[in-house]
Amino acid sequence: MLRAGRFVLLPLFLLEDGDVLLDLPHQIDKALQAFADERGLDKQEALYRILRERLIEEGHLSSGEEGIPPEKLNASNDD
């Protein structure tokens, strides 16, 4: 992790051509660290989980679970 002014550079994923860095404001970095600490994760895994959950919530990523999406449930298929 590198500090650059008001931002923290967090290496996210090691790619063939090197690290991808994300500029995070210190407040976000502190919140991410708290989230990670509460769950016994490193920041990379914490960020992965936060992003994955949000992308699933927004419908941009499949959770991998089968079933009827909540917005398509009705009285005839709500078991």
Image (spheres, grey):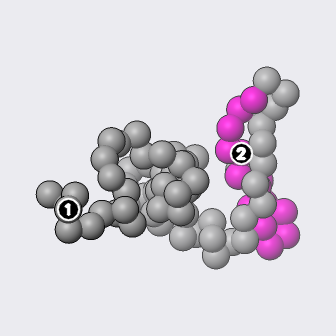
The residue under label 2 is 11
User: Which-is-in-front pick, marks 2 and 1?
Assistant: 1
Instruction: Indicate the amino acid at tag 1.
Output: Ser
- Report if residue 4 lies within the magenta region: yes
Q: Nearer the viewer, residue 59 or 16?
A: 59
Above or below, comparing residue 26 to residue 12 in the picture:
below
Q: Nearer the viewer, residue 60 or 46?
A: 60
Q: Which mark is residue 76?
A: 1
SS class, disc 1? loop
Residue at x 71%, y 32% (from the top left corner): 14
Residue 34 % position (x, y): 47, 66
Determine whether, in the image, residue 34 is placed left or right of residue 30.
Answer: left
Main SS category, magenta section: strand
Residue at x 42%, y 46% (from the top left corner): 63
Which quarter of the figure is the C terminus placed in? bottom left
Magenta segment = 2-15
Residue 74 % position (x, y): 27, 67
**Quadrant assignment, res 25:** bottom right
Dot placed on the residue nearer the N-terminal end, 2 or 1: 2
Residue 72 % position (x, y): 37, 62
**Around disc 2, counting alpha carbons within 10 Å, would you say few (fewer than 14), some (14 to 19), or many (20 or more)?**
some
Residue at x 68%, y 38% (from the top left corner): 13
Q: Work out whether residue 42 can be spotted.
A: no
- Report if residue 17 lies within the magenta region: no
- Tell me the distance, in whole angstroms, between the alpha carbons under discs 2 and 1: 48 Å
Q: Work out whether residue 78 can be spotted.
A: yes
